[in-house]
Image: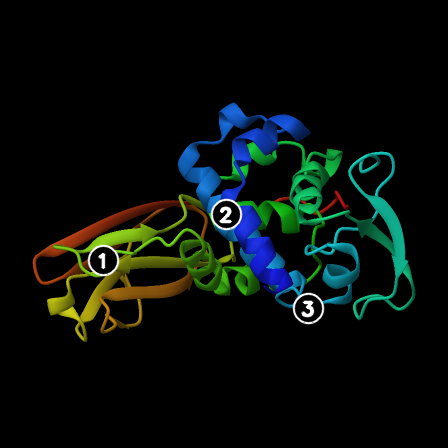
Amino acid sequence: MSLLDDLVKNYFNKDLATVFIKVGIANEKITEINRQSLKEVTLAQWLLESARGKSDLAVNANNFAGLKWRFPDMKGFAEPLKIRVPSEPEEVEFCKFTDIDAFIIGYWKFLTRTPYKGLEDYTNTPENFLGFLKAKGYSSDPKYVSKVVDLLPEAQKLLANAGRVTIPASVEQLQLIRAPKEVELGQNFRVEGVARLADSGKVLSIMIDDQFPVASVTINQDGKWQFDFVFKQEGDRRMIITINDQTLEIRIKVVVPFDHKDIT
């Protein structure tokens, strides 16, 4: 079994509510549905950060998230390890974890630090969670959010396979799988859904605020569909997605970006 397989299996079986209580995250503010979403998006994050479990940090330190050593916050949860990584010009102290279980707990402990205060209020969608982390200095990559979101389907599949979960192959009408309730101005986000198998190959009609059409989106052979979008104007926005006599309405709040003064 590979290191990545071990990570996925361990994370699938981990109760995030218990982890949150242990590290001091306000668990009561995060619903069970959002905890599942957090599992998926953080696994996608770790796939990116660790090169799918093959980075030196992952192999030598059980650190799948590129977490740097922070004293005294991480004392008792990890040990410092000086190592050179491709993203740094010289050796830097990173967190070294004893095993994968310690990493999972340590990752969430890392996010209880001062720069990430208020994290619980941004756990309703993957995009909001990632946007919050990036704005607080977790990553300087301007495309960080979209890179992680692109890996969400892979992370979801890995977790589904770990639990031998069968994803329904067909639905009776147009359904939404995922869409954020709130995004930042200029932030790329993804909308995903599923349609009847009988509608595969057909094109969805998508309108923004009843007047701005989105480029055509074709329904895949398995009934699934998705598209990326970026709002360039803040405010309460509305998407209408239709095919034949079926309609979905999505309301999204577009806010100005976080200020970037805080850093990790």
Q: In this view, does 156 lie to the left or right of 68?
A: left
Tell me the colour scheme of the image: rainbow
Residue 23 x, y percent position in the rendering: 67, 30
Circle 3 residues within 10 Å: few <14, some 14–19, many ≥20: some
Residue 97 x, y percent position in the rendering: 77, 48
Which comes sooner in the sequence, label 2 or label 1? 2
Residue carrying label 3? 54
Tell me which residue sits at (75%, 42%) in the image. Answer: 262
At numbered mark 3, what does the secondary structure look like: helix, strand or loop? loop
Tell me which residue sits at (78%, 38%) in the image. Answer: 77
For the question of whether residue 184 can be seen, the reply is: no
Which comes sooner in the sequence, label 3 or label 2? 2
Residue 25's quadrant in the figure? top right
Q: Nearer the viewer, residue 15 or 211?
A: 15
Q: Which residue lies furthest to the left in this view?
A: 245
Residue 157 x, y percent position in the rendering: 42, 60
Residue 52 x, y percent position in the rendering: 61, 66
Residue carrying label 2? 12
Residue carrying label 1? 241
**In this rendering, is residue 118 above or below 137?**
above
Q: Distance between the residues labelled 2 and 1?
A: 33 Å
Judged by depth in the image, the label closer to the viewer, 2 or 1, is 2
Q: Which residue lies furthest to the front in this view?
A: 1
